Image (cartoon, rainbow, N blue to C red):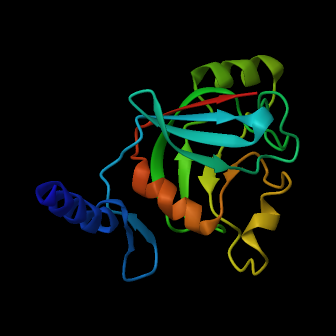
């Protein structure tokens, strides 16, 4: 019995280390675990984004979308978030928002559709944090759709997102 008690105490003492999260010197989220998403799924109808690793959800986020979220983005200024398979292709620290990762919209199919309609498909669709200088409550800003077609997270969530997702990761966006 004593042997099992000692083992239990040892394992319990390791739990905080195994499951803790650290912050870097600049206060950004830096998880200890080496989880990495290999797919991002967005359900626009539920305002949810899921990070998956080998088919298992490792993180879920509540999101804000473009002001006119239903339907696929067709042209610049339509306030829609695109639908389909895209790739997260690069991170930007320099924008009007707190950190961002670019979504590879428009793809070839989007370009052909826009050309056939005689419209500009737009671009610069990103997953990003809050607008620079925003001083309100982050939860409030996620209670309605306010972007021009991007996917918005809180700043803390954006840090976590970037720690779990690498450039090149596919993203599936659906209604």
**Residue 107 left/right relative to 4:** right
The residue positioned 80% from the left and 64% from the top of the image is 141
Image quadrant holding the N terminus, namely bottom left
Res 18 quadrant in image:
bottom left
Point out residue 137 in the picture as x, y percentages from the top left corner. Answer: 77, 74
Give the camera-side residue of 171 and 117: 171
Residue 44 versus residue 109 in the image, above or below = below
Res 94 quadrant in image:
bottom right
Image quadrant holding the C terminus, namely top right
**Residue 7 left/right relative to 85:** left
Q: Is residue 98 visible?
A: no
Task: Kindly give the residue lying farthest to the front in the view shown.
Answer: 1
**Residue 171 left/right relative to 77:** left
Q: Is residue 91 visible?
A: yes
The residue positioned 75% from the left and 45% from the top of the image is 149
**Residue 112 left/right relative to 40:** right
The residue positioned 37% from the left and 83% from the top of the image is 25
Point out residue 60 in the picture as x, y percentages from the top left corner. Answer: 59, 45
Give the camera-side residue of 139 and 65: 139
Point out residue 154 in the picture as x, y percentages from the top left corner. Answer: 65, 64
Task: Kindly give the residue lying farthest to the left in the view shown.
Answer: 3
């Amino acid at each position: 019995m004593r042997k099992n008690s000692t083992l239990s105490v040892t394992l319990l003492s390791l739990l905080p280390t195994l499951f803790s999260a650290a912050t870097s010197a600049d206060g950004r989220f830096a998880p200890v675990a080496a989880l990495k998403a290999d797919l991002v799924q967005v359900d626009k109808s539920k305002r949810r984004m899921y990070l998956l690793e080998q088919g298992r959800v490792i993180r879920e986020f509540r999101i804000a979308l473009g002001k006119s979220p239903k339907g696929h983005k067709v042209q610049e200024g339509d306030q829609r978030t695109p639908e389909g398979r895209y790739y997260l292709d690069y991170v930007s620290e320099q924008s009007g928002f707190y950190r961002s990762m670019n979504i590879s919209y428009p793809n070839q199919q989007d370009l052909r559709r826009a050309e056939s309609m005689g419209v500009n498909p737009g671009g610069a669709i990103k997953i990003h944090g809050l607008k620079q200088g925003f001083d309100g409550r982050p939860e409030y800003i996620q209670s309605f759709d306010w972007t021009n077609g991007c996917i918005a997270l809180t700043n803390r969530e954006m840090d976590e997102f970037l720690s779990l997702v690498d450039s090149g990761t596919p993203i599936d966006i659906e209604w």
